Image (tube, rainbow, N blue to C red):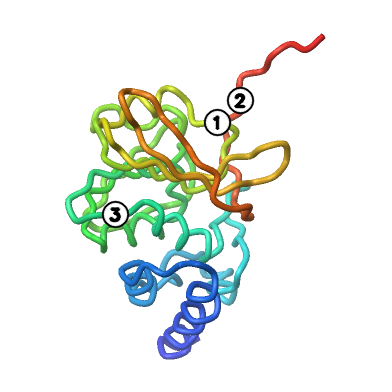
């Protein structure tokens, strides 16, 4: 497809998926209208770039639908200069958007995960649930997918007052959640049920029932 075709598809995505679905932060709309998502989609999947559903990647991973990305960015309330810990960077699309908004991004992806090449972004390869403690404390924890719980290892890497956005898997339902670190404790609020890509390695601790 031509660059003009992708540009038209990007405009349609903004108008039909974001503006109609509670993504009303003009900075988020502007950056998603500007950054070419096709640059972060494998060549064999590029026809799917702007559809409203996850895009499969190699290794069993997937890229979240554009609406999910827009909602996460809106709730993160990114300011220029914020230090962002991005968990589950996938191909780097969310990292590119955050960097374009002026954030200092540390993007964590698994060993052997998708290739990431985003100028100005620090990429850390390792266990997603362990984060990147060397760069702590962070102003924002941006978990780009759904997890059963936010592990203590990530919470401990946040500054007081840090914002957190993620998907939480609750009895099979994925919920968009956002919250803050206050006094060393994380409080999350459920905002909406939404289909999100599940990230590996975040199973909740099992408890015994009688």
Query: Measured from the top left, where is residue 60 in percent x and y?
Result: 63, 47
Query: Measured from the top left, where is residue 85 in percent x and y?
Result: 33, 41
Q: How many marks?
A: 3
Mark 3 or mark 2, which is nearer to you? 3
Reply above or below: 128 against 94. above
Q: How would you rate the neighbour count of disc 1 (Cα within 10 Å): few for under 14, some for 14-19, many for 20 or more?
A: some
Q: How would you rate the neighbour count of disc 2 (Cα within 10 Å): few for under 14, some for 14-19, many for 20 or more?
A: few
Q: Earlier in the sequence, mark 3 or mark 2?
A: 3
Q: Residue at x 55, y 31 (%)?
A: 149
Q: CA distance from mark 2 to mark 1?
A: 6 Å
Q: Residue at x 58, y 77 (%)?
A: 47
| Image marks 2 and 1: residues in contact by CB distance under 8 Å | yes
Q: Which residue is mark 2?
A: 204
Tell which of 160 and 40 is nearer to you.
160
Query: Measured from the top left, where is residue 125 in percent x and y?
Result: 38, 37
Of helix, strand and loop, which one carries label 2? loop
Q: Earlier in the sequence, mark 3 or mark 1?
A: 3
Q: CA distance from mark 3 to mark 1?
A: 23 Å
Query: Measured from the top left, where is residue 87 in percent x and y?
Result: 42, 41
Q: Which residue is mark 3?
A: 78
Q: Identify the mark at residue 24; answer none if there is no mark.
A: none
Q: Which residue is mark 1?
A: 149
Relative horizontal placement of residue 49, taking residue 102 as reference (left or right): right
- In the picture, the quarter occupied by the C terminus is top right
| Image marks 3 and 2: residues in contact by CB distance under 8 Å | no
Of helix, strand and loop, which one carries label 1? loop
């Amino acid at each position: 497809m031509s660059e003009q075709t992708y540009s038209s598809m990007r405009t349609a995505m903004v108008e039909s998926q974001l503006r109609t679905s509670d993504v009303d932060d003009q900075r988020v709309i502007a950056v998603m209208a500007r950054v070419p998502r096709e640059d972060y989609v494998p060549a064999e999947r590029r026809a799917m770039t702007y559809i409203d559903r996850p895009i499969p990647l190699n290794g069993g991973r997937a890229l979240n639908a554009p609406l999910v990305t827009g909602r996460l960015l809106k709730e993160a309330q990114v300011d220029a200069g914020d230090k962002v810990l991005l968990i589950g960077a996938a191909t780097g699309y969310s990292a590119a958007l955050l960097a374009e908004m002026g954030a200092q991004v540390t993007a964590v992806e698994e060993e052997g995960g998708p290739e990431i090449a985003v100028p100005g972004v620090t990429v850390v390869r390792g266990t997603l649930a362990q984060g990147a403690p060397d760069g702590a404390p962070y102003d924002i924890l941006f978990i780009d997918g759904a997890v059963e719980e936010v592990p203590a290892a990530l919470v401990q890497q946040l500054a007081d007052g840090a914002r957190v956005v993620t998907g939480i898997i609750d009895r099979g339902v994925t919920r968009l959640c956002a919250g803050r670190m206050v006094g060393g404790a994380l409080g999350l609020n459920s905002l909406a049920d939404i289909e999100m890509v599940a990230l590996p390695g975040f199973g909740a601790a099992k408890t015994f029932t009688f």
